[in-house]
Image (spheres, grey):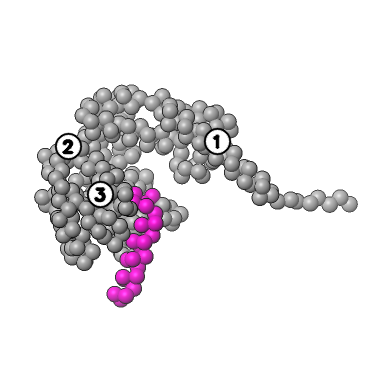
Amino acid sequence: MTTTTMTQPSAANDLDQARRDYERVTTALKYLEENWRDRPSFEDAARQAGVSPHHFHRTFARWTGTSPKRFSDALTHAFSRSLLADGASILEAALESGLSGPSRLHDLYIAQEAVTPGDAKRRGQGLTFRLGRADTPFGIGVFLIAPRGLSALAFADEGAEEAAETDLTSRYPAAEFVRDDAAAGEYAARIFAGERTPLALYGSDFQRQVWRALLAIPPGKAVAYGDIAAAIGKPSAARAVGAAVGRNPVSWLIPCHRALSSDARLTGYHWGVDRKRAMLAFESFRELHAA
């Protein structure tokens, strides 16, 4: 009688496979970053990585958390946004981004942000914001204050304050900004004392609908993007909901930190997953002791 012994892959083999996958993904990322204007196909990226399309899709998704197409779309979106912010027309932004025309740019923006390119270009037109920094329980807070109330709140680690300011001001490319750290300090004291804070939100109807749904999530709790999509009556729009959550301008007060991926992981928080975890713990502890 012949006995067959089944062997498990060794740790060394697993490590070798992980290294090969890493090399393939970095090769594909470089290729996509250098050629996104040409709209490379999925098969082209797989060929550059040296693997079959099926294996490439699984490996790329595991390493990056997205698909090659969505990665290329994100690069195109970011580039076109910079063009619009610099004054390019919608047609110019579309063509310079490698798209066939404004309709393709429109589809890209709806998928990425749930807003049109025209909405993105006009944001903040005719507005003057006060921009300031103040200490908060979650690091340095960066505040944008409109005449009617708070329009944006971001959080930054030490040394990253300017990047956070740029992130917020770039969302309102047509607006004016004046420095006012004192006003930021007043808002910080009010917010983290639990006082009512007036908000002045500028976004699409869809975005504001998603942000209102976030306000309905109880403190210390978390729900999936799909649950938010169902709550606003658009169960098939989980991806667009995720984009709208990511564009939430007022962190903490509009609790995008309470949104989770479909597998309940703490992913995708614009100001860092560690900060998201701390916010949920902070809320849970406060709710427990308030009960």
Does the rendering let one see residue 213?
no
Q: Residue furthest front?
A: 159
User: Residue 174 at what x, y percent from top left?
Assistant: 17, 37
The residue under label 1 is which amino acid type? Answer: Arg
- N-terminal-most mark, 1 or 3: 1
Label 3 secondary element: loop
The crowd level at tag 2 (other Cα within 10 Å; few <14, some 14-19, many 20+) is: some
Q: Residue furthest right?
A: 1
List the residue tagged with mark 1: 24
Q: Real-space Cα distance between discs 2 and 3?
A: 16 Å
Q: Give how far apart the Cα atoms at labels 1 and 3 are.
A: 36 Å
Badge 1 vs badge 3, beta-carbon distance below 8 Å: no
Which of the 4 image quarters holds residue 237? Answer: top left
In this view of the protein, which residue sits in the foreground, 246 or 230? 246
Q: At label 2, which amino acid type do we have?
A: Ala
Q: Is residue 244 above or below residue 140?
A: above
The quadrant of the image that shows the C terminus is: bottom left
| Residue matched to label 2 | 174
Packing grade of label 1 (10 A; few <14, some 14-19, many >=20) is many
Residue that appears at 20% across and 37% down: 173
For mark 2, give the secondary structure: loop
Identify residue type, mark 3: Pro
Q: Indicate which disc, 2 or 3, sits on the residue closer to the N terminus.
A: 2
Q: Is residue 273 magenta?
A: yes
Which stretch is magenta? 268-291
- Secondary structure mostly seen in magenta is helix
Q: Residue at x 25, y 55 (%)?
A: 141
